[in-house]
């Protein structure tokens, strides 16, 4: 098991946003966590990355408890995140943003050219925009940059927080096909989404999160055909 | 009011404006860099500068200067002045790092709001001023004349003297070095990342505490070097020397757009020139009034500074 989250609870002051959830990601999988706005998706990813501290529970990565590892050191453990809202550094160029994904890696200079090639094959658009400031990219391009930057850190687990948010349908298609492409390159993915239709059809396994609790789990395809889920998340209830 | 002086003395006023602006710039960079990473006005920064001026004075005392010597030759001067500058830079740099640990880090760890940090900044500033008032007997302290200040050559009405040349060459060299550090080193990229998006910087592996400590170090070193230039140029200091200089440097940083490095440079030279020309027209006593007026006007009407969005995007 690559990532194992057990009985995790996370609070903002007195408000408990994650109320004791367990989930896991196996090597090579795309796992999605689907939930409405405010369900606690971003809170979970921030906790895995160490930006928030849980009040209870365990987070194991590759069999090792990572909670004692400082947030900025977790990327070296092999976990990197493309955060909600993309987190592009607006005053850095596309290339500089990508290089930031290498910040933690001691041997980054030797890896740079090879990884840039790999990412420019995945996102040819970024190569064209190399020297443009991150803040001047369109939403879809920023999302590509955010994912590309996370990949620069050579993660074994990629955390994606609503990559489809605010994108035109054409871009959404493209982003999800790239996510599958990344999976074939051997990176496991935990994908958090409101866009249930796309996320469930892309994922191997899925969890449904409602106000801090996991209410259902199963194979992506099965949940796609689940009546309750169709009704609540896909707007095509029977 | 005498406007004709602006024409007849233009070159001279311009030169002095640039020299004063260069000193402001080195201090203004400290305000702007710290604001970038912490979103905090480090009001104790002016005292880091003040501490530097006394470090300069201390070196000359240890070297046995009494203030009545003849200026020394250029070779000996360079060695002496480099020593003074390095000591001031080390003193101010380490004081700035200590300040960060004592006055800000603990508050930050506790998640304190910005007002608490601001109060802590002002408290640290008062503490240092009063400490130095006691240590220095509230006296004016003169700095020995190290360099012959006779004119080397003239450009139009401007007498170019050796001290002004040293300040200009030194300050521009340092600005270039800073640019290389910010653009070309790992910690420099960390400073830019934390300034632009702190949370994402952490996700990329940036150690924010380390970056903040490094930022205070850079700001302190620049203020220390500025204090050596200041002593060479003005040849006197006092426990409250940081106040007006700090206000000028802070005004320059705000004028250029706080958090913006190029803005701080542009604002500093602009303010240096404005001060020289307005002093020439209105009289020297109006200099600080003009400075405060600019600060208030910018804060009221253009809080993002003169350069606004365009440079803002290229910030840090
Ligand atoms: N900084 C915060 N302070 C207090 N409450 C928060 C904060 N961030 C999120 N929350 C609350 O926690 C819950 C989960 O939020 P979030 O994880 O952002 O949900 P999602 O990403 O699924 O939309 C929501 O009720 C939200 O209002
Ligand atoms: Mg969210």
Image (cartoon, helix red, strand yellow):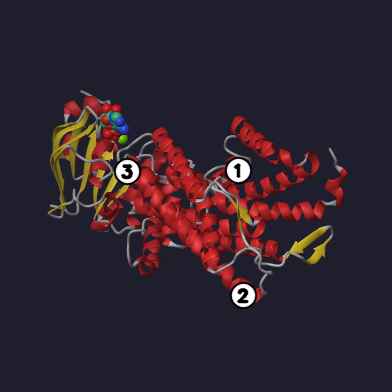
For label 2, the SS is helix
Whether residue A71 is visible: yes
Q: Which mark is residue B244?
A: 1
The image shows a total of numbered marks equal to: 3
Q: Position of residue B14 (x, y in %)?
A: 76, 53
The chain letter under disc 3 is B
Ligand 1 within 8 Å of disc 3? The answer is no
Q: In the image, ligand 2 is in what quadrant?
A: top left
Whether residue A194 is visible: no
Front-most of B167 and B136?
B136
The chain letter under disc 1 is B
Q: CA distance from mark 1 to mark 3?
A: 29 Å
CB of mark 1 within 8 Å of CB of mark 3?
no
Mark 1 / mark 3, whichever is N-terminal? 3
Image-based side of A101 in relation to B180, left or right:
left
Within 10 Å of disc 2 (Cα), the crowding (few <14, some 14-19, many 20+) is few
Q: CA distance from mark 2 to mark 1?
A: 32 Å
Residue position marked by numbered label 2 in the rendering: B76
Mark 2 / mark 3, whichever is N-terminal? 2
Front-most of B66 and A200?
B66
Ligand 1 within 8 Å of disc 1? The answer is no
Q: Could you tell me which residue is drawn at 30 percent across and 45 percent down?
A: A160
Q: Position of residue B112 (x, y in %)?
A: 34, 35
Q: Position of residue B294 (x, y in %)?
A: 66, 36
Q: Position of residue A177 (x, y in %)?
A: 32, 48
Q: Are discs 1 and 3 located on one and the same chain?
A: yes
Q: Are discs 2 and 1 located on one and the same chain?
A: yes
**Mark 2 or mark 3, which is nearer to you?**
2
* Extreme residue in the bottom direction: B75
Residue position marked by numbered label 3 in the rendering: B106
- Rendered position, B82 above or below A160: below
């Amino acid at each position: 098991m690559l990532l194992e989250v057990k009985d995790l609870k996370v609070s903002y002051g007195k408000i408990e946003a994650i109320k004791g959830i367990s989930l896991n990601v196996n090597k090579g999988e795309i796992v999605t966590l689907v939930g409405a706005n405010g369900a606690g998706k971003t809170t979970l990813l921030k906790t895995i990355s160490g930006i928030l501290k849980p009040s209870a529970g365990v987070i194991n990565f590759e069999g090792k408890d990572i909670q004692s590892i400082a947030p900025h050191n977790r990327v070296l453990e092999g976990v990197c995140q493309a955060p909600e809202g993309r987190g592009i550094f607006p005053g850095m160029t596309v290339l500089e943003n990508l290089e930031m994904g290498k910040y933690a890696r001691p041997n980054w200079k030797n890896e740079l050219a090879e990884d840039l090639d790999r990412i420019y094959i995945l996102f040819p658009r970024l190569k064209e925009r190399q020297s443009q400031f991150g803040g001047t990219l369109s939403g879809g391009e920023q999302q590509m940059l955010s994912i590309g930057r996370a990949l620069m850190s050579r993660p074994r687990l990629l955390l994606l927080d609503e990559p489809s948010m605010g994108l035109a349908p054409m871009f959404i298609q493209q982003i999800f096909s790239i996510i599958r492409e990344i999976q074939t390159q051997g990176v496991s993915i935990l994908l958090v989404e409101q866009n249930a239709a796309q996320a469930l059809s892309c994922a191997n396994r899925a969890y449904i999160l409602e106000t801090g609790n996991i209410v259902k789990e199963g194979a992506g395809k099965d949940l796609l055909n689940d009546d309750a889920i169709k009704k609540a998340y896909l707007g095509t209830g029977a | 009011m005498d406007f004709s002086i602006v024409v007849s003395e233009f070159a001279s006023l311009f030169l002095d404006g640039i020299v004063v602006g260069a000193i402001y710039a080195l201090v203004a960079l400290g305000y702007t860099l710290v604001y970038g990473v912490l979103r905090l006005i480090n009001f104790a920064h002016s005292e880091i500068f003040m501490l530097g001026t006394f470090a300069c004075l201390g070196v000359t005392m240890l070297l046995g200067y009494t203030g009545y010597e003849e200026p020394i030759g250029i070779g000996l001067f360079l060695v002496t002045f480099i020593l003074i500058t390095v000591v001031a830079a080390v003193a101010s740099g380490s004081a700035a790092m200590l300040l960060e640990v004592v006055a800000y880090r603990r508050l930050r760890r506790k998640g304190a709001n910005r007002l608490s940090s601001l109060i802590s900044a002002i408290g640290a500033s008062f503490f240092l001023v009063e400490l130095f008032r006691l240590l220095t007997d509230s006296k004016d302290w003169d700095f020995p004349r190290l360099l012959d200040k006779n004119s080397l050559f003239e450009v139009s009405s401007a007498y170019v003297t050796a001290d002004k040349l040293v300040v200009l060459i030194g300050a521009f060299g340092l600005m270039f070095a800073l640019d290389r550090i910010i653009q070309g080193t790992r910690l420099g990229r960390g400073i830019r990342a934390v300034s632009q998006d702190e949370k994402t910087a952490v996700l990329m592996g940036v150690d924010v505490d380390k970056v903040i400590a490094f930022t205070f170090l850079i700001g302190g070193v620049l203020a220390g070097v500025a204090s050596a230039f200041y002593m060479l140029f003005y040849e006197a200091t006092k426990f409250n020397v940081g106040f007006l200089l700090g206000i000028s440097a802070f005004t320059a940083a705000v004028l250029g757009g706080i958090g913006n490095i190029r803005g701080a440079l542009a604002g500093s030279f602009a303010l240096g020139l404005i001060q020289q020309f307005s002093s020439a027209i209105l009289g020297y006593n109006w200099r600080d009034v003009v400075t405060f007026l600019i600060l208030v006007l910018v804060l009221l009407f253009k809080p993002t500074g003169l350069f606004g969005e365009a440079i803002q995007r290229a910030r840090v």
